[in-house]
Amino acid sequence: MLWSLLKEVAQKHYGEDSQQLIPIYQCLARAESSQGDASSHDRATKLFLQAHDISKSRFGEDSVEVADSSFVVASSYINDDDSQDKAKKYLEDSITLYMRHRGPYHTSTIKAQDELSRLLIRDVSLEDAVSLQRSVAEAKVVLYGDPSEQAAASYQMLGSIRLKQGRTEQALKWLTKAYNMLSATLGNNHKRTKEMADAISRVKMSPDAQKFLSSEEKLKKRPRFTQVVGRSKPLGYSTNPSGD
């Protein structure tokens, strides 16, 4: 196959354990993965792991380069339902190293934590996802500002988790926070802001949400009546035949 030939050429040119092979193997792996079949995915994963091994041998297991390659390996496993434990392990490894080398307020750290949060949600480890995403939200506020689209995405995720758990009051709190951030950064007419507003409206329509609504919100939900509706007598009616 073409990929195998390219790999052999690269090995002969750079040497079998050269760090120059890391991006080459990762590029070949992505090309393999794009084929979409199981055997191509297996070959892609093998290439990602080979690149990871070279990274460890060349830079040391505690290096930021290994954090990068760990994250890449995790991406190969993350959509495979049978490999979720492996994906979680490599994500956790990358986060540990990113925290050590780059700290909590770096884009690479936050990106890996977001991926782990989504994985935890899929694994129904919802409280773990909440704990992690709350710290991510705080980091995003520091890095991107308050308000920011990035922080809004974290609060939206938190609200969605609470909805899964049936914790409507907390869900509304976080979804509303996300909406306010989007409204401030993107404007009320932006697609994302409108979608968030619609989501909040749907949540508020649920029976569980009624007891958490403010008096003003409850009034808005009441049907509107004209002054005529509900009168016991028609307008102009008088008990006095003369109209006085």
Image: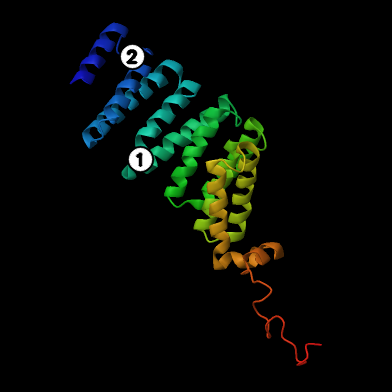
Q: Relative to the observer, which residue lies in front, 95 or 159?
A: 159
Question: SS at mark 2?
Answer: loop
Q: Position of residue 123 (x, y in %)?
A: 42, 49
> Could you tell which of marks 1 and 2 lies nearer the N-terminus?
2
Q: Left or right: 56 with respect to 1?
A: right
Q: Quadrant of residue 213?
A: bottom right
Amino acid type, callout 2: Asp
CA gap between label 1 and label 2 equals 29 Å
Amino acid type, callout 1: Asn
Q: Residue at x 35, y 12 (%)?
A: 18
Question: SS at mark 1?
Answer: loop
Which residue of the protein is positioned furthest toward the front in this rendering?
242
What residue would you read off at disc 1? 79
1 vs 2, front mark: 1
72 to 222, vertically: above or below: above
Q: Residue at x 55, y 47 (%)?
A: 194
Q: Relative to the observer, which residue lies in front, 195 or 101?
A: 195
Which residue of the protein is positioned furthest toward the top in this rendering?
13
Check disc 1: other Cα within 10 Å, few if <14, some if 14-19, many if 20+.
Answer: few
Which residue of the protein is positioned furthest toward the left in this rendering?
1
Q: Relative to the observer, which residue lies in front, 47 or 142?
A: 142
Q: Position of residue 193 (x, y in %)?
A: 57, 44
What residue would you read off at disc 2? 17
Which residue of the protein is positioned furthest toward the right in this rendering?
244
171 to 242, vertically: above or below: above
Q: Residue at x 45, y 24 (%)?
A: 66
Q: Is residue 133 visible?
A: no
Q: Quadrant of the N terminus?
A: top left
Q: Left or right: 109 with respect to 73?
A: right
Q: Position of residue 63 (x, y in %)?
A: 49, 21
Q: Position of residue 225 (x, y in %)?
A: 64, 71
* Tally of numbered discs: 2
